[in-house]
Image (spheres, grey):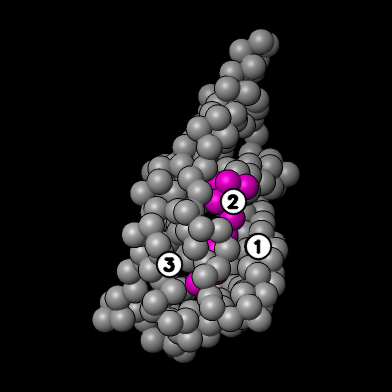
Amino acid sequence: MFRSMVYSALGVALVVGLFLSAVQTLAVSPIIHAAEVFEVAQPEVVAAHNDGHSHSHDENAWGPEDGFERLSFTVLSNVLSAFGFAIILLTGMLLARDKAALKISWVRGLGWGFAGYLTFFVAPALGLPPEIPSMETAAIGGRQSWWVLAVVGTAVGIASLVFLKGFVKLLAIVFLAAPWLVGAPEPLVHGFLHPDAEAVASLESLQAQFIYATAITNGLFWITLGGLASYAAARFIKV
């Protein structure tokens, strides 16, 4: 069964990863490219703050070239991410089938996908909104730690609501509230430090567009992933 699950996850990941890459190319990448123009034009002196905090922009750091190379790495990253998430969803579906006698169906698959969307995108994004280049951010360590807390708290909270019975369901409130009681880390300076006011206005507009675009893109990704994962689980993974 494990081999069937891995093969199923790989097949689902290839389809969903390519689909996500296509949607990102149309809806998300143009916004990032537009923001990068301002990042390149931004003088390095702006990156230094009076309080001693600074950003490190290593011009020699490797990154894929624009065009085919960048698109290829994006597709590879999306397929690998989709594979990992497909494994998670398939594991949950199979455990629910075998332990809780919940039959796998496309409706439940969409539910699993929606739960994944809430867990891995919506909850973290409420505290750490998607960011475009040139935007000031909190320290990476704090953001990563809070992201993990938000994901784990939301996942356990949703699972508690769905699978626990009686008053024990109230534990969901504790897990769902935990990330917000801790609080997401905040940058020392909010917004953008570009010296041109018109550029800042353009970046703020791009940031708003980016949030909407990533929310829709991730929603499509998770719903498609949940639906295809449920089909693969019912069709190819037997008890």
Q: Is residue 190 above or below residue 1?
A: below
Label of residue 211 in the image: 1
Q: Which residue is mark 2?
A: 125
Q: Position of residue 65 (x, y in %)?
A: 39, 86
Residue sticking out furthest to the right: 107
Residue sticking out furthest to the top: 167
**Element on which disc 3 rests:** helix
Q: Amino acid at mark 2?
A: Ala
Q: Position of residue 161 (x, y in %)?
A: 65, 25
Q: Which residues are magenta?
A: 124-134
Q: Position of residue 43 (x, y in %)?
A: 43, 82
Q: Are marks 1 and 2 in contact (CB under 8 Å)?
A: yes
Mark with earlier residue (3, 1):
3
The residue nearer to you, when weighing 228 against 68, is 68
The residue nearer to you, when weighing 56 against 7, is 56
The alpha-carbon separation of the residues under discs 3 and 2 comes to 20 Å
**Element on which disc 2 rests:** helix
The alpha-carbon separation of the residues under discs 1 and 2 comes to 9 Å
Q: Nearer the viewer, mark 3 or mark 1?
A: 1
Label of residue 59 in the image: none
